[in-house]
Amino acid sequence: MKFVKAILFIAITAGLVYVLDKPWAPAPALGPFLSPFCGLWQNSEKVIDPKTRETLQLDSLRDEVTIRFDDSGVPHIFAQNDFDLFYAQGYITAKDRLWQMDLQTRAAAGRLSEILGPATLSLDQQSRRLGMGYGAEANLKVAMTDPRSREALLGYTAGVNAFIRQLSPKDYPIEFKLLGYKPEPWKPINTMYMLEQMTLTLAGRSNELAMTNALKKYGRETIAKLFPDYPMLQESPIIPSGTAWDFPKLPVPEAAPAMIPGDSVALSARPLTALPDRAPKEEGIGSNNWAVSAEKSITGYPILANDPHLELSLPSIWYQVQLHSPDINVYGVSLPGIPSVIIGFNERVAWGVTNVDADVFDLYKIKFKNEYRNFYWHDNQWKPTHKREEIIQVKGQLKPYREQIIYTHHGPVTDSDGTFGELPNLAIKWIGHEPGNSFITFYELNKAKTYDDYRKALTHYVGPAQNFVFADSEKNIAITVNGKIPLKYKEQGKFVLDGSSRADDWQGWIPPDQNPFVKNPPRGFVSSANQSSADTTYPYYINWSFAPSERAIRINERLQAMTNANADSLRMLQNDNFSVLARTLLPKLLSILETRALTPKQKAAHIVLSNWNYQNSPESIAASIFETWFPLLGQAIWNDDFSSPEAPMEYPSRDRTLYLILKQPNEKWFDNVSTPEKETLPDLVYQSFNASLDTLTARKGAMSPEWEWSKVKGAEIRHLSRSIKPFNAPPLRTGGGSSIVNAMTKRKGPSWRMVVELGPTPRAYGIYPGGQSGNPGSPYYLNLLKTWEKGELNELIFLTSPEQKVPHLGSTLVLQKR
Amino acid sequence: MNFLIIAILSAILQIFAPWWVIAIVPFVIVIARPSSGAFWSGFGGIAVPWLLYGYYQHFISDGALTDRVAKIFMLPNGILLLLVTALVGGLVGGFSGLAGYWVRQIFRRNPAPVPGAVS
């Protein structure tokens, strides 16, 4: 009996330990996770006592580094040399953002399935087929040949790894504990993966398949009318019209006739191995930046502003830092995983970026000799392909997933138009594969002192092409549409290109000094909001479509009118909620409605819209109606002509739609071809108006404060996992919208707002939604959110020495050589 | 007394050893030091330090993390998560203590007091 009981209770205890030590997906192993000695409880953090002074002995440092933290949690790093500076940046960034760095590099490298299992295999396949690794490896080779980037990468890597090495499992960020894996050592190529990921986010899409489908259905003439290469209704280009292009122009390659797919050709069924359908280019990822000249500012020096719009996440994509060494003193935001500051200022200059919608992602139709795909036809001969094997380890599966990717000189053959059976036959030519050292651009900007330094820094840059705005304490302002931009014939890459024709290859590059730029323009300001880089007088082709013009128009109107500007004037412009779209279109729509008999409900909505001041403010009901209505009107016009699930077609742009409504009200496009009746513009306006009220009523009940724009939009900031909801930010109350300067949509928006007053000593302000720490258990996880939500900025503490006595400065961390 | 010894010893050991040391400590202590209430001294010896240490972590961060993690497990707040945590640790400790008690019985002649009663 005693034996039985002894064995029974030993078995129960052992059984409990076994069950608690084993992960039960999606739950982690509960024993170690719940134990207050090693589990989740350990990730609770308290506010650091400002008087704390801690010293750490670390390997491979060359000299002593002092780090001061301010009360926002921003590190101010003081080092004696580049290696130590980036070492400390790596160490401190890892301290706050290790899991983010791990997840983002895994996502870029196609290694999520190692930790998340088969659920993420298709995401990994996409990264692999796109050649993210191919691009990262090519870039790393170049970076390692320049001693400056080599030093930065090695220093950063050593710093991140110094942090990881001293972690015990109880110190792992909470996400590692939840997902049940441990951090792995950092490698220099991870930085390249982060840069690849940015290139993918900002310049990793193409619409030429959809354009080719449309071309096939409507023919050249109609497509030329509906998809013009420059906005027809309104535009306010980045480089002001009238700017002289005084450089010796290169000859532009000769245009090859666009391939028109034959009627027998199916442009539909995608083989399993092709890239999955990527979301089409959507509005919301874009940015604003501008600088006003000394003449326009009250300080007598230029003022610069930048707010990049990206998907908002927790932790934030950005991490604030000040980097100081004998030849550098820079403050701004960095991207965790990349040494240096990406957007910021130093004692002499400030800079910011917005995306250029350059067409640097083209599809080439490949003619293979046979299904082995060892040879492809190019320039009148069979040329050999190259193969790259991608191996994806999948958690819970014994054998890794393997796939052979075929490469031509264009790039990986991973997309498909469905004409080669089960096999992909479209090669991707993408700037993300172009070897270069874009990091050096940021490195040199961090140290830049003059306008010439800025121009020189930009020449190293490959992609994703950015509009680099600039201002300095010598009272210069400038903006450069910058990146390695292929020298193309007009409309090259608007449709699928012929992969067998040499004439369709990228023929070279626009020389860096001939990229569109302007310095100290007479109008006294420079700006960009992702719109057309230049007007039609610019001699080279960059793309046929850019972000819609409304944000740019509003920014330029307000900057034109601005006098005696200070940082607060620019901050207010960043928060501007005025809808140029509504101003352009709504009067016409309302006048059409007035010709109809309206129900009381419709009349009420009509009155709300008539009294609207075009402000997309958080409490506006009119904004909700208009923002719901306009997309429905667009669909009512185009769906019958362009909706085609089996062969998706590009829709005409917003500008083209507005032009049609305002200037061509009798075009055939207003008729719905799927009904026997003949619809007119007024019919569609009325129908879509009704549909928008129905939509809002279905979602929010009869018109009431529930219809306020902030509630209808329902902006949210999710944790980077996108699935751990309790780590999300609380609900937000924000105005703005996708065509608004305050470009806050449901999930995308101003990921960093910065305003810098240049001068003998710069004064700068900035904010991002979130906090420096990626730990949901830290007081610095969400500490900046409220200030951001209110549209306010924090003054950024810019130190000149670690001993400097200024308010808001807190604890000190000293790193010493072991 | 065993309760205190288990509590102190397990707390010290957990700083270095893996979490499952809580299944060893009560077992060994109860074998070494016979007493009544093997289950509850094991339960309390593990649960009480878990409760106190967990509450300290919860308190210093104002529940920032614990309240959020509680919601992942469909619990309303961090305090309830803490009680669940203590219960889990306590059960392991308790059964470990019981196992220790019966193993000791194998090597004893005189019948011992009924396990389970509070010592």
Image (spheres, coloured by chain):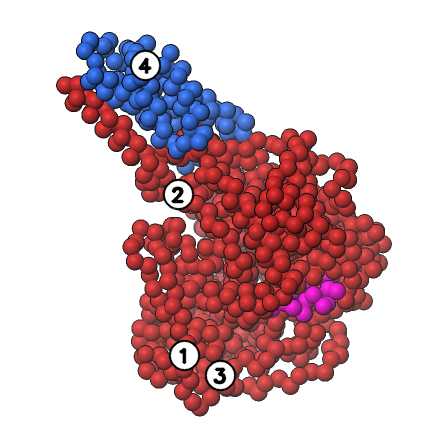
Chain colours: A red, B blue
Residue placed most toward the observer, A655 or B1: B1
The residue that mark 4 highlights is: B33
Residue at screen point 43% across, 19% down: B8
Looking at the picture, do discs 4 and 3 lie on one chain? no
Comes first in the chain, label 3 or label 1: 3
Task: Give the residue at x 70% y 74%.
Answer: A513
Q: Tag 1, which chain?
A: A
Q: Chain of mark 2?
A: A
- Is disc 4 in the same subunit as disc 2? no
Quadrant of image for the C terminus of chain A: top right
Name the quadrant containing residue A147.
Answer: bottom right
Give the amino acid type for the residue marked by disc 2 in the picture. Gly
Image depth: mark 3 or mark 1 in front? 1
> On residue A180, which mark appears?
2
Q: Which residue is mark 3?
A: A258
* Residue A443 or residue A520, whichever sits in front: A443
Q: Are marks 2 and 1 in contact (CB under 8 Å)?
A: no
| Mark 1 → mark 4, Cα distance in angstroms | 76 Å
Residue under label 1: A385
Q: Bounds of the magenta span?
A: A453-471
Which secondary structure, mark 4?
loop
Q: Are marks 3 and 1 in contact (CB under 8 Å)?
A: no
Label 3 or label 2, whichever lies nearer to me, is 2
Q: Could you tell me which chain the residue with mark 3 belongs to?
A: A
Q: Secondary structure at mark 3?
A: loop
